[in-house]
Image (cartoon, coloured by chain):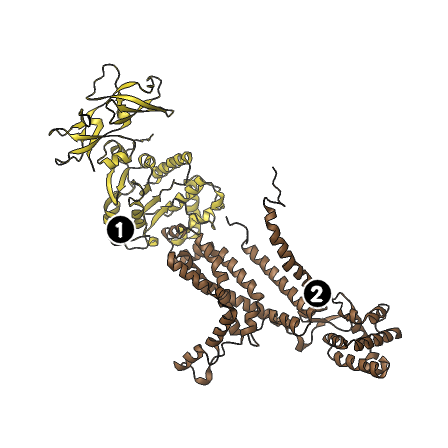
Amino acid sequence: MRRSVLFPPGWRLLLPLLAFTAAVFIMPIGVILWKSIHDPEVAALLPATTASLESWSDETMLPPSASFDALASDMRNLVEVARIGELALRLNREQPGFRQLVERSAAKIHDEGTPLVETDRRWSDPASWRLIKRASEPYTPRYLLNAVDMRVTPDGTIGRQDEQRQIYLRLFARTILVAAIVTGLCALIGYPFAYALSVSEGMLRSALYFVVMLPFWTSLLVRTTAWIVILQRQGVVNELLVSAGLIADNERFALIYNFFGTVIAMVYVLLPFFILPLQAVMRGIPGQYVRAAESLGGNPARVFRRIYLPMTMPGIVAGGALVFILSLGYYVTPALVGGRTGQLISNQIAFHIQSSLNWGLAAALGTLLLMLVILISMVFSRVVPIGRPQR
Amino acid sequence: MLTVTMKEQERPARSSAQSVVLRNVVKSYDGMTAVVKGIDLNVQAGEFLTILGPSGSGKTSLLMMLAGFEQPTSGEILLGGNDVSRLPPYKRNIGMVFQQYALFPHLTVAQNLAFPLEMRGWARDEIAGRVAWAMNLVRLKGLEERRPAQLSGGQQQRIAVARALIFDPELVLMDEPLGALDKQLREQMQEEFARIHRELKPTIIYVTHDQGEAISLSDRVAVFDGGRISQIAPPKDLYEKPESAFVATFIGETNRIPVRRASASLDTFQMADGRLVSAVAVGMGSSDDRGYLMVRPERLRRIAGREYLPNVLEAIVLEATYHGDNVRVRAGTITGDTELLYRISNDGNQPVPHVGEQVLLGWRTEDARAFPAS
């Protein structure tokens, strides 16, 4: 019988997982990707205005008066259903100052019946109308551009974001830096430990395993509390340093609620992800290779560099990729111990989802993060073919 | 069937010096029981010495001490006249061939061969020349850029041998190097080892539990038993003149007949049924009463016609097994207390006995040896 590549024997066993993955992983991610470019909010809030602005062709001139009437009626309706605030907030994201403009104009229209054009002179500026037209388009590159500190200016060109609003590229850079430092520290601490674990047997091995798995068995809050106890200004480390006379009482180190705290805590949590795949690779290397290299005249340092290290490289890359990628999306630890300088891109995504309710931007940041992870995975898998058998 | 190649014993050695000297080497892992119990051994430069023994006989421990992966609990190991007992492996200048080859999987064949030379600080062009020489030696020219995984088992083994020889080591250790190969390849590789040894004359210590390899390859064989050398001798002597019951039974097939000493005569013994037989007594002290008489199946002959042999037993054929070049016959003595094994060459001249046929089996006194029991 010919074996199908697409349906290998037993493929039905994969169905439950595939269904689960599709439902809770692929679909939500699809929604997020979609949200980063699809934004019907303004069009939904201003249906009449959106329709009338479609026929507005010469954007250097003001739109026809029908558009003024449409916007006035849309605003009146929004005030009546108490949703004018949503519009004001939404447009303010495009252009600071619009919140006040929209709320005041709407109030005058609704309460006093003032014509729109008389509520504020900014309505006589075509730029304001261009902004509304841009914002009412359901498909927009705006969020993706914002996520890389770019923006669509009211006149439709793409430019740099205002100086004080350029935060995301720097945050992405910090996230990558933290991921790199955490991965590097995990490698430095984890490699010797993984070796010890791979050569140990019996009780010692069980004990070492226990130490590695410890972070998984402890609640995050307990761990966080512990770090605070240890690392804070009045914490164990600082007290020891002061009582040993190494630093003065007013020179205590800030070890937590900053970049340093984030890195320390993340290394601790992510170490097992580096150690476990690496020690599995190490255990698969028979001792005869090192013995052969020694018998051929290699001293321990050279045997390590030329033989053992290259042979364990698949483990280093697998563990490193795991830690690096997990670090890129790390959220809870930086949120708890990161302070201001230890915040990462995920914390900003959470902020936009929970506090600022700018889901489009959150989705765009998430999309960029996903792209970054995919890119890095591809680079890693070029170096070592992950998932493909070695040799 | 064992293949006994008659080797010339006196070959022009690379130097007349003794290459490897072991003096009362003892190894104990727990400080209580010794796995190697005092080995004395001299290996001539250019000699091919095989260490043969069952598993647990201490041969692997000795190998590990020679290579430097273990240190002797006491005693000395001299290499080219220098005490290397406490030197780490990488300072010993010993080439080693492992059972699983141990070729570095991430390096090409050429890089594998270059490794020991790089460790010795050879210049790049010297290395290239020497690698070419080694590829030539094992007849694998053209495979330099392959990875070990792309080679067959036999090719990997040749590269492993080339890598152990390429830096002209004082001593080459081979640890069951043919263990992972199938029978046919094993025979080919034996010839290859013999050729390389003939061409280069390296000092080789070869560890195996395969007596066939030991007998066909070696200048001398050291039989290990329980952490000691039971006997060390050229293969022919070992097979034909074993000095202990262990060696006689461990190497080749043999008939083992329980006997008692008969009277004061040194070479006459009494079988269980009272029959008197003769053999060369080996190591039978005056206090040894019980022992075993051993005679090789090929020296046990069916007597036809009026041939005279000093020892004759009547036996009944129990089984005849066809082996191609010979027929192996199992027969029991009339009294039923001893079983005998003999072979008939399948040369077409000798009829194969049928089961139940009565035969007369005999041996010459000098073809049988008697050892003390236990």
Q: Which chain is yellow?
A: B
The residue sitting at the left extreme is B264
Q: Chain of mark 1?
A: B
User: Rounded to the nearest whole Å, what is the CA distance between mark 1 and mark 2?
Assistant: 73 Å
Residue B133 seen: no
Is the residue B33 above or below the residue B297 in the image? Answer: below
Q: Which residue is mark 2?
A: A35
The residue sitting at the bottom extreme is A250
Q: Which residue is mark 1?
A: B27
Nearer mark to the viewer, of 1 and 2: 2
Number of on-image labels: 2
Apparent side of residue B188 relative to residue B18 in the rendered image (left or right): right
Q: Are marks 1 and 2 in contact (CB under 8 Å)?
A: no
User: What element does badge 1 sit on?
Assistant: strand
What type is the residue that disc 1 sits on? Lys
User: Could you tell me which quadrant the N terminus of chain A lies in?
Assistant: top right
Query: Would you identify the image quadrant in which residue A80 lies?
Result: bottom right
What type is the residue that disc 2 sits on? Lys
Q: Nearer the viewer, residue A226 or B187?
A: A226
User: What element does badge 2 sit on?
Assistant: helix
Q: Which chain is brown?
A: A
Location of residue B226 in the rendering, given as x and y in whole percent from the top left corner: 26, 44
